[in-house]
Amino acid sequence: MSRRPPAGPARTAAPAVGADPRFENGPLAVVEAVEGQVLAYCVGGLVLDVPAKSLPALVEWALREARLGQPKLSGSGKDADPLLVLTEAALERYGLPVALTGEERLAGRIPEGHKVIKQLTRANWQLTKRGFGPWGRVYRPAQGSERSCVQVCIPSWDALDTRHWADAAQLEPADLARLLGLYASRVMTPRGSTAVTGLELMTALHPPTRASRPDAAGKRYSEHNPGSLGRDPVDCAPCEAPDGHPLLAGLPRFHQRTPAEVLMEEAYDWARPLTDTECLHSHLVGIDVNMAFAAGANGLTVGLGGPEHVRQPVFDAKLPGSWLVDLSHVDLSRVQVAKDTWAHLDASLLPSPFTPGGERPTGPAWYATPTVAYAVELGYDVHPVEAYVRRDNGRYLDAWYQRLRDAYLTTMADLGVHADLPPQEFLAAMDGYRHRDPRLATLVSAIKATVKGGIGKLRERPRGEGWKPGQPWRALARPTWRPDIRAAVISRTRINMHRKIVKHAAFTGQYPVAVLSDCAVYACDGPSPLDFLPYRDGKPLPGGFKLGINPGLVKHEGTQSVLWGEGVREQFDAPGLNLARYIKDGTVTHTDNGE
């Protein structure tokens, strides 16, 4: 193996690879074919000659000679497998199609009878059940502790979703290696989509097993790793099961479950007409919570094991679970905003904290622990009828949050947006930050998508494969298929937003006109968030919205005129149109149906 000089100078410093000599060339390589040669572009501008003449030989080279990979993120975890990113020229060189056909795209893989797959089979390599697609995994069964596995990423097969990776698939090999290398060093080596990687990161930080203490003969065994989700999947509670789940196979066809039958913890999608007073203001200003779902996961106690069904339970805010309770008596016109301090608000101008659509509940419904705890925080008693609680619990997502928070803050600092900037300087730093380095801006998008996608994957739905309602689907076999954890994170994220809205309303008398997930829109007499956020001597309202880049703080999402807001509602004849969805650039392309 020889080293060649970089094809061009690196524009920024390469990420630290670490001192492990097994992975001295970094976590991944972008493989390119140029004038009869095959080159591997690694992090730091390093370019390696690749002698492999076939895909099986390329896999062998990645494992035996390339010194690619990444050290484990946890003491009881596993090292990351090498990642090979194949350019279009490399695909042609190794006999693979440059693009998938429509049928292959739907299947997510090339046919099992493809000549390259036959080559792999003859060389005793195996593929996972998902086959050879945009993200492939080529492996041989582990021999003891030694793994033989290589991940393959194929950008021209849409491996890098443009929603999160922008134009990364069109980058030159050295630039793509830099971008993916930064992601690997700050998050982890990609294992698939950002959503798949977000889920894999949870497991990498909390591996299901660890080595036991030596027995009398000095031998160690694999045992459960405390604080992890373990090796085996656990059943969800019936109320936590999505439609079509095997637990619901006995329900009549087309049965629509009521709030008293199904847990519906989802993000906000709420809007209301402007009041006459608000119509007199000049601007609508949107603010967006940074890494809202990551902030919702931080410090959250979630279940690690299966649920225990309890009748007539006494609510315990420290016990994760799902609770059937009537919260319709909670009156937002009078709420407790601090100990022994009550505030009188205009409830008609506020979304309910208990439903995604913001409507007040009308009877018993299932809620995750953070939602019920918030009803108690607002000053109201709660009396659950039944619950599914998880006695085995812990702060499973803390390390995951910290890893992604640090990745986000480090990358934003690289773009000139630092933590603890004064409000005006922060707004100035955020203005146009994406244009300072488009590649780093893409990295920010990928990190944020890793958060949202990872949480979403905790309740992954069936993905074709001939699935029928009532039958199990592949994701149910994962220990990380945990709809209860997803519900708890979303619940806490929504409650965090409502708490800030209430604090702001109690202090200023201002109410949002729209809320969409982590974005809230207010009417005010100026284009800046500082025109309505209450800062005194540079300090924000305690417990309210605060400008800043840290997860949980807010940034400016966008500003439009009040006339724009009223105009689009009239244009689309939709009084309840959610202005938060369009506040960023003001473009409304179709009638808002809430989807």
Image: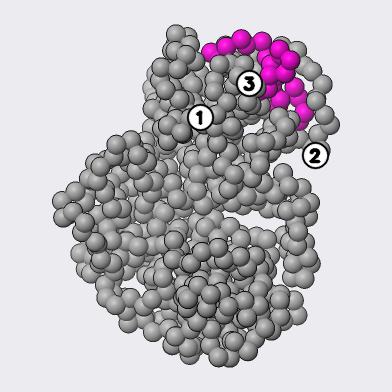
Instruction: Determine whether the residue tagged by mark 2 lies in a helix, strand or loop.
Output: loop
In the displayed orientation, state which residue is furthest to the front.
Answer: 571
Q: Which residues are magenta?
A: 31-56
Disc 1 and disc 3 in contact, CB within 8 angstroms: no
Q: Residue at point 46% right, 37% down? A: 207
Can residue 161 be seen in this snapshot?
A: yes
Could you tell me residue 177's position as x and y percent? Answer: 69, 32
Please, what is the three-letter code of the amino acid marked with disc 3?
A: Ala
Q: Quick check: is 41 in the magenta stretch?
A: yes
C-alpha separation, residue under disc 1 versus residue under disc 2: 34 Å
Image x and y of residue 551, in percent: 61, 59
Kindly report which numbered mark, 1 or 3, lies closer to the viewer in this rendering: 1
Q: What's the residue at 81%, 38% (across, down)?
A: 11
Residue highlighted by disc 3: 90
- Of labels 3 and 2, earlier in sequence is 2
Q: State the CA–CA distance, disc 1 to disc 3.
A: 15 Å
Q: Which residue carries the number 2 mark?
A: 12
Viewer-nearest residue: 385 or 313: 385
Report the amino acid beneath label 2.
Answer: Thr
Q: Nearer the viewer, residue 18 or 27?
A: 27
In front of the other: 143 or 590: 590
Per the model, the C-alpha gap separating discs 3 and 2 is 26 Å
**54 relative to 531, above or below:** above
Q: Label 1 belongs to which residue? A: 100
**Left or right placement of residue 147 versus residue 85 in this view:** left
Q: Residues within 10 Å of mark 1 (few under 14, many from 20)?
A: some
